[in-house]
Image (cartoon, helix red, strand yellow):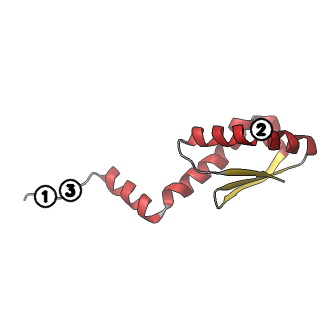
Amino acid sequence: MIRRNSQSIGEVIQEFMNKSNLESKIFEQKIIRLWPEIMGPQIAEMTTNIYIKNKILYVSVSSSVLRNELLMCRSTLLKSLNKRVGADVITNVMVR
């Protein structure tokens, strides 16, 4: 029996993820999961309701001072999160 067009399981899974757009959802969840690790325990404690919609990361904070700090370093935060995941998952950060 000669097999033609055979693929490894990894290739099949990757192809499925690309076709079904699951890869971007996995990256989004990874960013949300990494938020406390990247920001540190004190900032993570003051942030709630973290989610991604239309490539925008939304974060609610309990402190106006922290809100201003996060808004000022938005571009650095954006680059750091995308770099950590290894893909351009988010394009903007909205802090509420």
Tell me which amino acid carries mark 3: Ser
The residue beneath circle 2 is 73
Give above or below for 47 relative to 24.
above
Q: Is residue 86 left or right of residue 96?
A: left
In 3D space, how far apart are the residues under numbered discs 3 and 1 (Cα atoms)? 6 Å
Q: Nearer the viewer, residue 57 or 48?
A: 57
The residue beneath circle 3 is 6
Neighbourhood count class around disc 1 (C-alpha, 10 Å): few under 14, some 14–19, many 20 upward: few
For the C terminus, the image quarter is: bottom right
Mark whose residue sits in front, 1 or 2: 2
Give the residue at the far bottom of this rendering: 20
Tell me which amino acid carries mark 1: Arg
Residue located 63% across and 47% down the image = 31
SS for dot 2: loop
Residue located 64% across and 40% down the image = 79
Q: Is residue 14 left or right of residue 92?
A: left
SS for dot 3: loop
Q: Position of residue 63 (x, y in %)?
A: 91, 45
Residue located 70% across and 56% down the image = 51
Q: First in sequence: mark 2 or mark 3?
A: 3
The residue beneath circle 1 is 3
